[in-house]
Image (cartoon, rainbow, N blue to C red):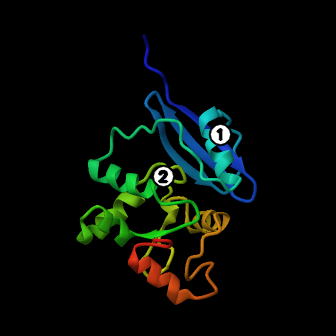
Amino acid sequence: MSPLKNKNGSIHWEDFGTIFYTWSHEGLQNISFSEKQSSTKEDHPALKKFFKAYREGHEAVRDFPLDIQNYTSFQRHVWHIISAIPFGEVRSYQWIADQMGQPAAVRAVGQAVGANPFPIVIPCHRVVNANGELGGFSGGIEWKKKLLAMEGTQVCNFVCKKKPRSILRGLRKGGLGI
């Protein structure tokens, strides 16, 4: 039996651009973004369903595997914690480090967040700096702003116009809503 080849595909979102993905025999391998529309079409039904639910403003349920075999246990632990951040909320890098029981590992957490090959599916766009600034995002800061706005997220120095101190206090305590 010959091994399955990786499949590449894309999903176009109006007002956003194109989401590219690679699927291996183990599962989803990576996601990347472009402002331009692509002619590549290889729709994966489960991934298409996930992104449709997400785009419609619902907490999308992932019912497909992720190909994480080439990543460290530390990265997988960070991504597991990020996966629990609710739709429409944010948490800080420090909060993630605290959840891991490694409060001094905030920089390593930042590196693991930045190495996330599954943005949106593992919602690293929901991770911000402790001071309320957006931080980075693999798809670029404009994608991060659009994703957070689509979720209705209130983040200081971006969307937040009212009560910025209360939001900052929430981030310092561990995140909004906690």
Locate residue 150, reporting x and y percent. Answer: 67, 64
- Asked whether residue 26 is in view, the answer is yes
- Count of numbered tags: 2
Residue that appears at 45% across and 53% down: 83
Residue identifier under label 1:
48
Rendered image quadrant of residue 14: bottom right
**Dot 1 alpha-carbon crowd within 10 angstroms: few under 14, some 14 to 19, many 20 or more:** few
Residue that appears at 71% across and 53% down: 56
Residue that appears at 55% across and 50% down: 32
**First along the sequence among labels 1 and 2:** 1
Tell me the element at label 1.
Answer: helix
Say above or below: 134 vs 138: below
Locate residue 149, reporting x and y percent. Answer: 65, 68
Q: Nearer the viewer, residue 18 or 86?
A: 86
| Amino acid type of the residue that numbered disc 2 sits on in the rendered structure | Ile
Residue reaching furthest to the front: 178
Disc number for residue 122: 2
Locate residue 57, reporting x and y percent. Answer: 68, 56
Say above or below: 56 vs 102: above
Q: Which of 178 and 62 is in front in this view?
A: 178
